[in-house]
Amino acid sequence: MARTEAWTKKTVSKDDWEKKLAAVKIYKEDMNKLVMNFLVTEGYVDAAEVFHKESNTKPGVDLAAITDRMEIRKAVQSGDIQQAIERVNDLNPEILEQQHELSFHMQQQRLIELIRQGRTEEALEHAQEYLAPPGEEDPAFLEELERTVTLLAFEDASQSPLAGLMDVTQRQKTASELNAAILSSQCQEKEPRLPTLLKLLVWAQNQLDTRCTYPRINDLAAPTLTDPMQT
């Protein structure tokens, strides 16, 4: 008769785990760079300036350029798409010229704002001039255009099946896409490193969960090590 043995996961005590963590060398300069990267990428100019003075960590970019980028992002988030387009072109006209999908989404957002304001005739003219041509060349653009124009068929577009296009999250989506394009044009990272490291932490813990019991971090917002001996 074949005999099977139950596999028992190894348990690592909190004391042993903390000793292992303490043995890992983490340099303050690296942590400062991580913080600065987050501040710069997310556009916290004032905080970046203060942190630069306090830690002597260089931002690596012109902080004035960050101000321009955040003003553009703010314009999109407030629905002033035309101003955002003009400011992007002043900053770097190649961004919208070379990225056709982004350009389409900016004009699509402009159409949504016109519909939101009840400027039906202007919305139709805008769609015909700026969105119909790319729609004729790309079926995906045409589908997005048709969905957006359908909003005009409803008396209250915010209560329609396509209400998601009218939500502020749609503005945020467009603003984030534009922000990433500006960062890329300035040879900067599109996303801060800190969230990526947190995702890596979650992945690593999920891998460890299959092999051993250990003091894991369950809440990233208030990170504390659990005691495996008490669970």
Image: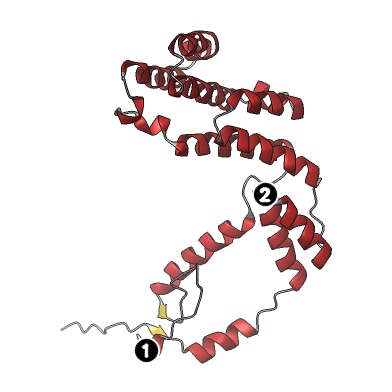
Q: Nearer the viewer, mark 2 or mark 1?
A: 2
Numbered disc 1: secondary structure: helix
Question: Is 38 drawn above or below residue 224 in the view shown?
Answer: above
Q: Disc 2 marks which amino acid? A: Thr
Name the quadrant containing residue 94: top right
Q: Which is nearer the eye, 78 or 203?
A: 78
- Residue 154 position within the rendered picture, expressed as x and y whole percent measured from the top left: 31, 20
For residue 230, the mark is 1
Q: Residue at x 61, y 49 (%)?
A: 191
Q: Which is nearer the eye, 134 or 200?
A: 134
Res. 151 in view: yes
Res. 187 in view: no
User: Looking at the image, how many numbered discs can be counted on the residues?
Assistant: 2
Numbered disc 2: secondary structure: helix
Task: Say whether residue 26 is left or right of residue 74.
Answer: right
Q: Disc 1 marks which amino acid? A: Gln
Q: Residue at x 47, y 10 (%)?
A: 136
Q: Which is nearer the eye, 156 or 109?
A: 156
For residue 72, the mark is none
Question: Is 97 drawn above or below residue 229 in the view shown?
Answer: above
Residue to which mark 2 is pinned: 41
**Lower sequence index among marks 2 and 1:** 2
Question: Is 174 drawn above or below residue 226 in the view shown?
Answer: above
